[in-house]
Image: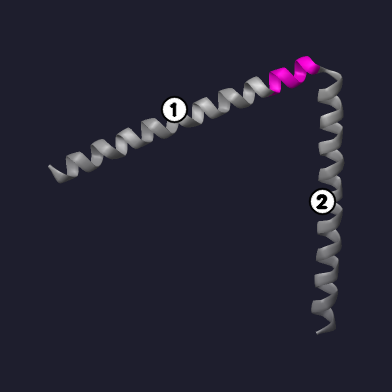
Amino acid sequence: MDEQIAIAIDTKENLVNQRLTFKKMQMRMNDFTSRFPALNNLISKINVKKRKDSVVIGIVIGVCVFFLVMYALR
């Protein structure tokens, strides 16, 4: 029982450390992008492109599934 509690405490400490590490990384990225607005603009354009690509892929998959269902029911 004590061993399980020790494992749980160690796991909690590791998760807290990971959260702090990710928070520091996020703060550094925010500082970096605020110093270089062109980089922030580039990152936002890349994110818009990713969203557009995801929508196009979703539409293509939806159309393919629709045609497969229509073919199967024919």
Q: Which residues are magenta?
A: 37-43
Q: Residue 42: x and y, percent?
A: 70, 18
Q: Position of residue 48 (x, y in %)?
A: 59, 24
Indicate left or right for 72 with 11 as reference: left
Q: Nearer the viewer, residue 9 or 28?
A: 28
Q: Is residue 64 left or right of residue 71?
A: right
Q: Which residue is mark 2?
A: 19
Task: Give the x, y percent position of residue 26.
Answer: 81, 37
**Element under label 2?**
helix
Residue at 85 percent across and 70 percent down: it is 9
Q: Earlier in the sequence, mark 2 or mark 1?
A: 2
Corner quadrant of residue 13:
bottom right
Q: Residue at x 50, y 26 (%)?
A: 53
> Residue drawn at (70%, 23%), measured in percent from left and top?
43
Tag 1 secondary structure: helix
* Disc 2 residue crowd, few under 14, some 14–19, many 20+, Cα 10 Å: few
